[in-house]
Amino acid sequence: MWQRFQRIVDQAMTRITDNIANFLPGVVVLVVILTASLLLAVITRYLLLRALQSLDFDQRTKQFGLSMRVDWSWHTSPSLVIARIAQWTILLLGLLIGLTALDAAIPSQFALSVFQFLPHLLAALFILVLGGLVARFLGRAVLISAVNMQIQQARLLSLTVKWLVLIIAAAMALDHIGIGRAILLMAFGILFGGIVLAMALAIGLGARDAVARAIERQMQAPERPEDKLDHV
Amino acid sequence: MTSTGSSSSIEPAEAAGKEGTGTAVPAIGAARVDLAIGLVTFNDASTIPGIAAAVQASLDARQVPASSRILLADGGSTDGTVARMREALGPRASDLVEVSYPRLPGDLLELPYHGMPGRARALRAIMTSARDLGAACCVVLDGGLQNVTPHWIAALADPVIESGYDYASPFYLRHPFEGALTKGVVYPLFRALYGVRLRQPATGELGCSARMLETYLDDDLWDREGAQVGVDIWLAATAATGGFKICEVELGPRAHRSRGEAGLGLETTIVQVVGSLFADLETREEVWQRVRGSVSLPVIGDEVTMTLEPREVNVERLIESFRLGYRELRDIWSWVVPPRAIVELRKIANGPSDQFRLDDELWAQIVYDFVVGYRLRTLKRDHLLRSLTPLYTGWLASIIPQVRDLSPALAEARLERLAVAFEAQKAYLMSRWRWPERFRT
């Protein structure tokens, strides 16, 4: 009985030792890859930062009108943000490559799926950034034009355009990475349908008299002649 | 600064255009001419006979007979402008030379404030032809003018031919409310920066010498971005900054047929006119930073006095426009205008309408802030210039009650004070230009 128990324990110990012996090189490789990627990330960050600073990237970003209207301090300048993104991307990639070296099924599958997902994620990020820029640009253009046309609701108009573009960009980004495609479409339908329905109900029921009065005023109001001045 | 060369060409008589009657046109280069009169036209059949009659009468009336050519740069008129010109010139039609220049399809996409698409190319073609003819003087008139008299041509040409001036700029009699953008921004800025008191630098007419022509044609202004819109201001700036002998000539009131530019929005006009001047300041940085003070120009001709049609302007609406702008655009303004000035604007916006005043110094500083913002591209230039519109209407609402009941002389004196304020604040511009970050508070 004791001998049998000892044999089972020995076999178990042998299996554990074998597994450890098999697993250990992977861990060593993981550590090596992580160390290398850490070094590479730090060097890349340093070189990228130096290169961007020598190109006067922060100033050029402002000149191209891409600055986000935040007072970029020394620790959040555009060049530093880019350098940090590059550093963390390299670290993340190193970690994923390292995980595949472990030869374990779950981490390897996870790493592979992340690698497959990465292009979509980057494309979605690009769509989001571009959408943000376009939204800001259009929002500002609408605001200025509406003010110059003396539209009292200029701000509302501008925010509407800005958020419409942002929402569309976000929806496109989410659609690109395949998150909630069906829900997204449905949400859009419900949202826009809801807005139109709400407006129709508001005008048809709640504000019917007000709208009638406004139209009447518009029809009866004497036309205010524009000041025909030659400004030049 | 070198030119890429002119692209103009002078059409022989038979090729003078499909509208032409085939009248003989003198060969270019056959003889030097004393006077070249350049006309820039585009569908101006209704006004061109009047101009032709004035040109003809002016040439006939010259005491010393001079050889002359009439250079017509037409922008592709479809209403028979060229034929009517030739017809109206009568015996002088033999002096008519059609000057062709490249017309681009894109010209028609943007309507300039002066109403002439491709104006820079047309002017360049005229000036190139005038130089090739060896003209001692070149007078340029816009084909849309409705009240040209023979006196105009003589007034623009004589200072050049007889008194040795290089550049004769017209001074038109205008109602105190008219030309407010010129009076409130263009003239004071031009004067403070270039040191020359040229009161109407954006007009489309001029007289210039052969020396001036050479300088213009050697300049790179023709190829700069926005040249088709800003060419008139840039030509004036070249004359003002090049050490040339300049004068103004009294021409009385100016009436111009609109080619659609009358419908141009104020914000677009500001983008075009102010933007052209700002762009020019950028290219002449080395020049204006050395200029101190300003010199007055001789004004040639008798002062024209006449009763101008009274104008009514709704000042309250201008004030409302400013207030709306302050409410919605002050965040954008704060990108270029320092907080101290924003506080001043808040006081004005929140104050009662009957005490609505925008100080000359504050207005000058704001314009200079926009100059710096334009240079630094703090935000898209088009947006920046458009956001100036409510500030300009605020200034207009402030100045109109001040000049409404004044005689033209006193109104002129009031605007002189504004121009002096721009000169006094030039140091502010230079500081901001050199150290823009110092003015964050």
Image: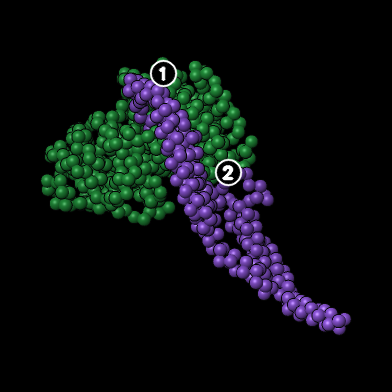
Task: Give, as a three-letter code, the residue at label 1.
Answer: Arg
Question: Whole-percent x and y of residue A153?
Answer: 47, 31
Which residue has dot 1 on it?
B404
Reply above or below: B127 against A201. Answer: below
Foreground pick, A219 / B355: A219
User: Which quadrant is home to the N terminus of chain A?
Assistant: bottom right
Mark 2 nearby-residue class (10 Å; few <14, some 14–19, many ≥20): few
| Chain depicted in green | B
Task: Return the chain for callout 2.
Answer: A
| Chain depicted in purple | A
Task: Residue A127: tell me if it is visible.
Answer: no
Foreground pick, B288 / A122: A122
Task: Give, as a three-letter code, the residue at label 2.
Answer: Arg
Marks 2, 1: nearer the viewer: 2
Residue at 71%, 75% in the rendered image:
A26
Reply above or below: B3 against A28. Answer: above
Which residue has dot 2 on it?
A69
Q: Quadrant of residue B431?
A: top right
Residue at 45%, 39% in the rendered image:
A194
